[in-house]
Structures are given as structure tokens and as C-alpha cells.
DNA sequence: ATATGTTGCTGAATAAAATTCGAATAAATA
DNA sequence: TATTTATTCGAATTTTATTCAGCAACATAT
């Protein structure tokens, strides 16, 4: 038995999917070529960034979700994007926002469990420029990526 | 000229997409029927919840993003899910989490602009059971739904 | 208003992909 | 080991995406 599922999850996290043109055409009662044309337009204009899968994260070893609120050190206020860009490639990070209102950065982080989250915090959040972090643990997710549970 | 794009965006926000089995097969160097079988398994077991599009929200009239931290009134502490379920169907809400650590609920909300956000706050967050809200406005998004900018 | 260029729409034909099915293999269980 | 169950995968079929050409709608200039 091959372990294909883990690799599939990884790939479909951010891509390797596409629109179901026939179904969209039926739903909107338009010719499928028209739907096709419009979606291609939206891809060209970058309105559409990707097609991807949404998972039940409890079932794929990403059961723990934390919002991490970050205060930067004063010398990093000027370009929070520097740290942000360092973080983008971490697969545990679902979203990164530069913010205002008490914290300079907001991360949404998914890990398997507390052990992995601890590792994440140690490796990532000890980066230069991060002064203080506050973690808000999600106890239950009722909606994710616009998809209700 | 028909206004198909708005309807397409709405539908592809949470579905009407599917995996690109042939591409996954090529990437993983496996037969496409094997990929097909494995994905169907993941759909049946509910590991996969949906296939959807990710947008550049600035370009589709959802340019303003706020994290809304919510304190519930003491009488609602017992079942935060009641309010949560009332909120699920709002299309502006990307995610709803029941949380611990200072706030009982965390919303991620996307609106066109401040005017629409104000309407949202008035209509939704004046619901019974919500004691206090704090909004954190995203100034810049570096990663969303696992997709980097 | 008319001409001209550009963008959007659509049916027909083609190319490509998903799905089904059956048989073989591998894994799990007794 | 024997038996059942789950997974792999090639061949055939069904379904879907894509291309293309022509037409319609719209915008802009004359």
C-alpha cells in the first residue's frame, strides 16, 4: 500500500484543482463555453489565484488551530513585510496578515497537536524582530475558508 | 454583456471545483486511476470537505478584511455554538472559531469597504449574547487559505 | 448617426480528462 | 495458513474541457 494520501493533501492544499465548468453552466443556465471564457478571464486578470481543496483538519493531522497575535520590536515597525515573507513558506501557516489595533501581525497556524505547535513557536516565533506573541487556541471551528462545518 | 462573474465568484467561493487527477498523477508518478480511487476515499471519509477557488479579494469587492474578537455575555458562555451557528450563513464571514484566551469567539470577515463592514457590525454583532467586540483590521495579507500572495 | 475597433458570447468539432469495471495484488484478520 | 477486505491499475467508456470561428454587444471616434 502506497501512502499517497499525505502527498495528495499537500498538493491539494494550495492547488491541483480546477472549476467544474459543466456544473457551473447548469447552475447558471449558461453555455459551458461562456463559463469557460469567463473563468479564463478571471484567471488572466488574477482575480482567481488558485483552486484548492478544503479539508476536515481534525482528520488530516492538523487538528490544532491557533491564532497567533504578534507584537514586533520597534525597529521592525517600518517593514513588517520582511518577517512576513520569511513566514510565507511554512506549511503550518494558513494565513498571515499585517494588522493594526494592538498587534502588528496575525497568523493562523494549524498543527497536529501541542507538541508540534510548541516546535513551531520555538522555531518560527523566536525570529529576530518579534517582541511578544499571544496565542488564541481554537476550541471548535464552525466555518473555515468560507466552508461551514 | 451578462454579469456572470459575480455569480461564478459566489459559487466557487465554497465549491463547484474538483481535483485535477491527471496532473496529480503526473506529479506523483502514479496511475490516474489510483489517484482517483484515493481521492474518492478521502471524500467518502469526509477528510475532504470541498474543492473551491481562492481569490484576490482586493479584485472582487472583498478588499477589507477584519478579525473580530468577541466577548459573549455570561449567560451565553455555556453554548457559544448557538450564536456561531446563526453566523455561519453570512457570506462575509470566512471563518468562525470558538476560542479561549480572552475572547470566546473569533471571526474573520471580508467586506467591500468600511461602509459594508459597518453594516455588518450593526446587523450581525448586535445579536443577543454578544457583550463586546474588538476589530483588528488587516492592512495587508501575505497569505490566505494557505495560498501566498 | 455611422463607422471602426474591441470585447464578450456561443455552437460545433476536437482534444483531453474523469469514471467505470474487472482482474490482480497486497494487507488485514481469523 | 486460509479467508476476507482493501488497494492498485490497465483498458474501455463516458463525460468534460478546450479550441475555434463567427456573430452580437459595446465603446469610441468620426
Image: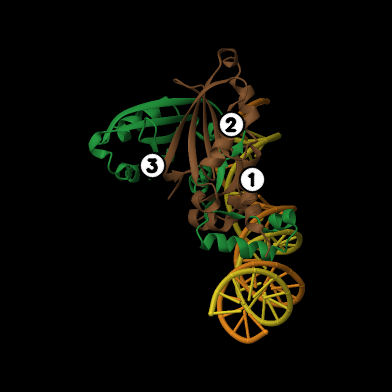
Chain colours: A brown, B green, C yellow, D orange
For residue B145, say whether it is visible.
Answer: no
Q: Position of residue A132 (x, y in %)?
A: 51, 22
User: What residue is shown with label 3?
Assistant: B90
Residue at the disc numbered 2: A122
Q: Position of residue A97 (x, y in %)?
A: 53, 28
Q: Residue B36 in the image: state x and y as whole percent.
A: 64, 63
The CA span between labels 2 and 3 is 37 Å
Local secondary structure at mark 1:
helix
In this rendering, the answer to whether B61 lies above or below D22 is above
| Viewer-nearest of discs 2 and 3 | 2
Q: Quadrant of residue A46?
A: top right
Q: Pinpoint the chain carrying mark 1.
A: A
Determine whether B70 is above or below A26 in the image: above
Residue under the image location 60 percent in, 39 percent down? B147
The residue that disc 1 covers is A40
Is disc 2 surrounded by few (<14), some (14 to 19) or many (20+) residues within 10 Å? few
Instruction: Give neighbour class at mark 1: few <14, some 14-19, many 20+ (Cα, 10 Å).
Output: few
Amino acid at each position: 500500500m502506497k501512502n499517497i494520501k499525505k502527498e495528495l493533501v499537500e498538493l491539494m492544499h494550495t492547488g491541483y484543482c480546477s472549476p467544474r465548468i459543466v456544473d457551473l453552466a447548469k447552475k447558471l443556465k449558461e453555455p459551458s463555453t461562456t463559463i469557460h471564457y469567463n473563468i479564463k478571464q478571471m484567471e488572466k486578470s488574477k482575480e482567481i489565484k488558485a483552486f484548492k481543496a478544503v479539508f476536515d483538519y481534525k482528520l488530516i493531522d492538523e487538528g490544532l488551530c491557533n491564532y497567533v497575535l504578534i507584537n514586533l520590536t520597534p525597529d521592525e515597525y517600518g517593514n513588517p513585510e520582511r518577517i512576513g515573507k520569511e513566514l510565507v513558506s511554512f506549511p503550518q501557516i494558513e494565513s498571515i496578515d499585517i494588522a493594526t489595533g494592538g498587534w502588528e501581525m496575525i497568523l493562523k497556524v494549524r498543527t497536529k497537536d501541542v507538541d508540534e505547535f510548541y516546535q513551531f513557536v520555538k522555531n518560527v516565533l523566536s525570529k529576530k524582530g518579534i517582541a511578544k506573541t499571544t496565542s488564541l487556541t481554537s476550541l471548535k471551528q464552525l466555518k473555515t475558508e468560507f466552508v461551514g462545518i
